[in-house]
Structures are given as C-alpha cells and as structure tokens.
Image: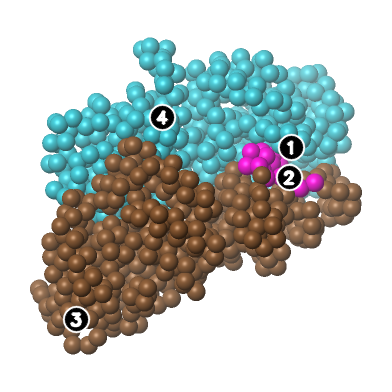
Chain colours: A cyan, B brown
Amino acid sequence: MNEINKIFEPKAIAVIGATQKTDKVGYVILRNLIDGRYAGQLYPVNPKYDEILGLKCYKTVLDIKKRVDCALIAVPAPAVPLVVKECGLKGVKGVVILSGGFEEVGRKDLADEIKKYAKEYNLAVIGPNCLGIYNPYNHVDSIFFPMYKLGRPRAGDISFITQSGAVGSVMLDLAAKYNIGVSKFISYGNGTVIDECDLLEFLGKDKKTKTIILYIEGIKKGRKFLKMINKVNKKKPIVVLKAGKGEQGKKAAVSHTGNLAGNYLAYKAAFRQAKVVEAQDVDELFNLMRIFSQPLATGKRVGVITNGGGLGVLTTDAIEKEGLELAEFDEKMIEELKKAIPPYVNARNPLDMAADATVESYEKTINLYLNNDKIDMVVVSVLFQTPTLDERLINVIGKAVEQRKKPIIVVTIGGEYTEVYRKIMESKEITTFTSPAAAIKTLRKFVEYSFYIRCKINKLCSFY
Amino acid sequence: MNEINKIFEPKAIAVIGATQKTDKVGYVILRNLIDGRYAGQLYPVNPKYDEILGLKCYKTVLDIKKRVDCALIAVPAPAVPLVVKECGLKGVKGVVILSGGFEEVGRKDLADEIKKYAKEYNLAVIGPNCLGIYNPYNHVDSIFFPMYKLGRPRAGDISFITQSGAVGSVMLDLAAKYNIGVSKFISYGNGTVIDECDLLEFLGKDKKTKTIILYIEGIKKGRKFLKMINKVNKKKPIVVLKAGKGEQGKKAAVSHTGNLAGNYLAYKAAFRQAKVVEAQDVDELFNLMRIFSQPLATGKRVGVITNGGGLGVLTTDAIEKEGLELAEFDEKMIEELKKAIPPYVNARNPLDMAADATVESYEKTINLYLNNDKIDMVVVSVLFQTPTLDERLINVIGKAVEQRKKPIIVVTIGGEYTEVYRKIMESKEITTFTSPAAAIKTLRKFVEYSFYIRCKINKLCSFY
C-alpha cells in the first residue's frame, strides 16, 4: 500500500521513453507534467537524446544520480521488462507502464517478466496497457492526452479505478468541464501486478477519497473482489460500471485487456450483495458520480418544483416508475404555499409555477420544501430560458444545497445559455441533470444506498 | 388546413397585448419578431401605448387599416374571448393564444367562448396556454423566451408538435446549439380548437417536414388520433413522447393543460400498432429526432470501429442487449482490414484500434465497413482526445455519411474540446451520441422503423 502511495506522491519522476516527437506518448506525458506544473524533479530517459523540452535526458534510469520515486514507462512492450528491472535496481518505488502489447495480444511471457521483477524489487506496478494516473493535488499526471484536448479536473474527493483508459478519461474530461473535484485517477489496464482489489483497498483508506468510481471488464480474483467491495462500500460509496456483459462483449473484453469478463449474472449478484451502486453506461456513471456530494436521503418522498409544466409531468412519471414517492401536502403546507405563489398556480406537488415564475417564488417555495419534514428530497426543475428568471436563482438553490438538510437536485435542459448556468451550478456543487428520467433514476439509486448506510444507524433498512 | 398555414406564412402579424415592459410576454414576442428579422408587417396592439419598439401601436386589432393574417395574443385570460372575436371581425385568418388561465385552471367557460368565435369566424386557433409557433424559414416566432436565452434553430426538416411549451422549447434550444434544422414548431397548449390530430394532418402534408416530433400528455379524440398516426407515420416518421403515464403523472397533466392523460397502456398499444417510434424522455427524444436524417437500415448487423477499447466493449454490450447483431467478418474482410491497421490491432468486430489510431486508419477502415455488404450500419466511436487524431477525421466521417450507403453514427464523449467537435459534426448532419447505450438504443428503434417502411417495399417485415 505504501508503494502505491509513492506513485501518487513522488518527489521525483523519471519518464522512460521520453521523446521529442510531439504526437508520441513519451512527449505528451513529459509536456503535461511541465505544463501542469508538477513541482517535483523530472528526469526524461532516452538514450537517443541529450535534452528534451529543456530537461537533461538520461540514457537509462540507472544514470540518474538522484533519487527517483516513480517511473512512467512508455517504451515498446519488448523493452519494458528490462526497463522495469532497471527501475528495481535503481530503487524506484513504483512504475506506471503505459505501453500496450502484453496479455491483450497474447504476450503473457512479457507480463510474467514484469511480475517477476515487481516481486523481486518490491515494486508497485500500474498497468501495462493503460493511461496510468492523475493526482490533481500535486499534478502527477501520466495521461498521454494533451491538456487542451482532455481537461484536467480540480482537486476534490471523487476517485476513479478504471480498466479502460478511454472510459476513465472521458469521465475526467467531463469532470473538468463541469469543475467537479477529483482525488485520484487510476487507469490500470491489464492489472498485471496491482489489480482492482489492491486499488479498492488503497482508496478505501485514502483520506482524500469520498466516492469511488469503478469501471471493470474482467477481474482476476472473484472472492477477494467480493470481499473488498463489501468492505469498502460500507465506508465509501462505490459506483461500478461493468462492461463485457454479453457473449460478444466478453470476447471484446479479452481483446481489450486480456482479462476474462466472466458471467455477468455473478457480478450482478455480487454488486447486489455488497450494495454497490451499479451504472449501466458512461452517462449514468457520470450522473451517479456527482450525486454522492448530497446528504444521505432519510426517505423516498420527493418534492418537485418547476416552471415548466411538461417537465413536472415527466418528473412525476419517473418518480412513479422508479418506485419513489411524490410527497403529499397537508392543509398547512398548502396554505403556506398559497402565500408564496400567484393565485392561478395550483398548490400541489409537483408544483408547476408556469413560465412567469420568478426567482422570489422559487426561493419561497424551495424554503417551504426544505422545511417540510414530509419531503425527503427536492427536485428543482428549471427552465432558465424564461424572461422572468436570471442567475440569482443559482444563488437561491446554492444556499438551499449548502444547508445540507436533504438532497436537492436540479433538472435543467437547453442550449448554450442554459449550459453556462449548468456549469456555474456544478462548480457550486449543485448536482444537475439534463433529463427528468435520468435525474430520478440516479436519485433512486442514491436513496437505495442511503437506506443501506442508514440501516446500520437507525434500522431504516428496506427500500421497498 | 389552409387556415393553419396562414399562421405559418403570414404577411402581416398583430401582437395583441404588446407592451413596453421588458419581462412581459407581449414585449418579448414583439422584440423577437423584430430581432429575428421577420420581414412582414408588424402591428402592436394595446390601448395603453401609442408606440412600442418604434412601431405604431393600435388600440384594437379593428383599428388596423391594412390586412392582418395572424394575431399573437398575450392578454389576460378573461380578455381573450373578446380579442378573438375582434380578430374574427377584422378578417384575421389565424390566432395564437399564448395566455394561460383556461381549462387548466377550470375556466372551461372562457375556452368555450374561444371555440364559439373560432367556428363563427372560421378562425384557426393555436393554444391557449402555449408558446405558439416558430417557423425558421420566415422567422415567424411567438415563443416568448428571449433569443439570447433560447436559441432559434436554422431552417431544416424536423417539425415539432408539443403540448408542453417547456419540453418543446428545450428541444428547439438543443437544435439551435447543435445547428440542427427545423421546419415548424407548434406548442399548442390546451389544444382548445386546433388539436394534435389537426396538426399531424397538417405536417403530414407539409413538404418542408420530413420528421415529426410529438410530445403529448392527454389527447381528446382517441380513435381519430390512432387513425392519424397510422396514416402519417407511413409517410414520415413520428417520434412520440407521452407524458402522464402513472396515476400521479395523470393528475399533474390535468393541472398542466386541462387534458385527461388516459390509460398509458392504451397509448402504448396505439403506438405499437401504428409503429410510431416512442421515446421515454427528453434526451431520448433528442437522440431519435436526429437519427432520421440517415438512410433507412437494410438489416440489423452493426460494424463498430473505435480507438477506445472500453467504448467498443460497452457498444458491443448494448448491441446484444438491444437485439441488434455484431456483424461477422469473413476471411476476405479480415485480410483487407489487416492491410489497413497496424499489426498489433486485432482484425475483428468491434475493431479496437487503440489510442494511437490515426485519421488515416479510421479512413481506411470506415471505407471497408461502408463497402462490406454484411455490415448494415456503422458505429464510429471516437476518443478525439488522443494525440494522433485531429479535425480531419470529421471530414472523413462526413464524406462517408454523404454517400448515404448505410446509417453511420458517431459516439464521442468528453469535455469542451470534444463538444466543439461534436457541434461541427452535428452541423454537417453527422449524428452524434454521448453514450454507447443511448446510441445503440436509438439505432435499434431506427432499425425497427426502417424494417416497417421497407416491409412495404421488399417484404423485409419482421425485426425479431
């Protein structure tokens, strides 16, 4: 475990296979470390160059006189084992092997050599065949996509373990776009040495990680994995996307990382038993990843406020479909609502304030919903495009979210203007959605997890 | 029918309830007509003003000496019937009533008066309680949301009939964002006079409309509606989103437009019988709305090309889940593929060219897929964030789409950089998706519709 941490907190990094060719992995990662303002020592390694990007270049890692904590390796597969051995000899603590060409193309022999050296030198090894790691706290970054193409998110508390670099990186890119904070990103590829179980254990103990996002295709140790997700998910929510479900999907998975995807039903059973939250695709993974910034739900009664009637109807449909409940209003609540809304608005749930709703009417009604103990969570569905609304509404919602009384989410759909508002909201940790169905589905899964955790506290055990 | 067209092709428009108050409907629509460069005559009507936005203002529509084809009405509900009557007396052909406060709040009496005058003066009436209409061909626009808040899409061939202004307008806003062309937009609210059946008939005959997007909650004439969707869907695809499905949703629907939402199972049966394409939410509606620019599918065998292994696995899972098929490659195809890709790439479907795929390898393999008659449609899944790709890939895909040999769609997910590429692609009529599951679900529904239409041509009747 200490070794894994060395990869994330290195004082000195060697980039082995660094190059001056700008579209190569060995160039892009060195460039990203410099542009990203990584503050530690950087040592490019390549026998062909004396200097790369203004840094002295070394023939081998053994030629570096100072200490090296971590090596990022981007040399062709056949050359990797020797490089790993040299890292061991040098006393490097951990390596990240970005190169592909191992188990996934039938070169188990090369993978076995890496394993051997990892054991011999007590080396932490991430990869091969991966994007490696990203730590926004210190800008350690082995993702070989240029920064202008793939955004790097700010520091926060969501961590990623992903067998697919593509799936992981698009999640990072989305997090950067919406200014969502990330703790640690680990694309571990073939998982030859360090696998998902090791990484789950590591992140389970990582103080900066509050939510774990996991993308897997095939795992190596079923029983250990089940034990691990059971253990970690009790402390921190694990959201998992399992790919390679069908027969064809399994074959594609083997060709991807060399791992057997196994029987999906067994995975599904394991996820259910451990009560980890399962996503069915990338968009759902993105939705679920943000919802855990909310306080746990105490029940399943939803209050809905909108200025778009159709959105209120669609939200209501989704609530019924997902097995949540539309909160019921008593006489007192109806009386209070009537004071807050124009006379032509029906004081009911969903509350449809129509297209002339103002920031003030949203503020009053949101507060009534927040303080009503028969409403467990609030869905604020906003058509920002109307003439009477403006960005003050974001502050109103932000203040409500800050109180952390109950989960509050926003559904808002639209073009450029609304997208700007959405970005502002996400940066203020207001969870937004662009479809009522997706919002409520996410909320339902969040409520299920809330019940699971609260069960241990106050016996509120069953969702249904 | 001719009367409905008058609303969309007016030479002169009266804005009744025009005002100088900038957050009011009567100001915003006048402003939008001016800013949108509507080229016909514009007559503001309001007894309180002599002039609004530089235009002479009239006390009543009867005071306008010249011909008026269409009136946009934004006065309080109780004043609407008299205004409608005056429009009839004036010889106006059609009116759009934006004001709310009729059936949806129990004022059936006011609605009945409108009906009476509509009949008496042979007036086409859209609304009340709606956003009205938008025609990008001549900038007729009654949508009372400011243009900087809600984008207006360019002219094209997708038309909208929506009972909810909110749902309809967000679709327009999304269309504007991605430069997707629209023919006619009709938010018809309570549907007091002109209802969904009249509008379906109208758009069925409209030469500029190729795809019809329909959002409904409750309809008035079930049998007529079933007959109409059967008839129109044979000529042009109808994509429908039905809201108000559950018990609570139905109540919300009545409170929204005063229409009974009825039994969803009956709707579902009607949609299946007529083979209209059903969407379950706004995001699915948006996805389905764009897929019909593709040539009809001739089968259900999908070819997948990607540079993101995990995306390939997820796409394969979705293909199996949705009942489509992963196309099989024969020896000849494998040999040809091998010439187009580096030796370490497996020549199989899904084709995972890994993170160093180039524009050239995409070009070669896309062409092989296009010309392989055992592939009915192509999914190009692109991680644009890699160092080796650039915008030339958009031209490669664009050329493939232009050939119209088979459906080709793109899956691409990411932040700001990828979103720019996505906008360029959509503006070139390359259909894009941000989730493999959503892409394949949309494709499956498209294939079902394709089979339905082709059934009449070549007996290829059954999807399953």
Which of B2 and A262 lies nearest the eye of the viewer?
B2
| Residues rendered magenta in the picture | B309-328
**Marks 1 and 3, how far apart in space?**
68 Å
Same-chain check, marks 1 and 3? no
Can the viewer see residue B292?
yes
For the residues carrying marks 3 and 4, which lies nearer the camera in this image? 3
Query: In what element is the residue under mark 2?
Result: strand
Q: Mark 4 packing: few (<14 Cα in 10 Å), some, or many (20+)?
A: some
Callout 4 amino acid: Gly
**Marks 3 and 2, how far apart in space?**
63 Å
Query: In what element is the residue under mark 3?
Result: helix
Give residue B128's quadrant in the image.
bottom left
Tell me which chain the residue with mark 4 is part of: A
Name the residue beneath numbered marker 2. B326
**Marks 3 and 4, how far apart in space?**
54 Å
Name the residue beneath numbered marker 3. B90
- Of marks 3 and 2, which one's residue comes earlier in the chain? 3
Does B18 sit above or below residue A261?
Answer: below
Give residue B388's quadrant in the image.
bottom right
- Of marks 4 and 1, which one's residue comes earlier in the chain? 1
Callout 3 amino acid: Lys
**Could you tell me residue A123's position as x and y percent?**
74, 23
Q: Are marks 3 and 4 in contact (CB under 8 Å)?
A: no
Q: What label sits on residue A323 in the rendered view? A: 4
Tell me which chain the residue with mark 2 is part of: B
Quarter of the picture containing the C terminus of chain A is top left
Q: Is residue B311 magenta?
A: yes
Does B212 sit above or below residue A120?
Answer: below
For the residues carrying marks 1 and 3, which lies nearer the camera in this image? 3
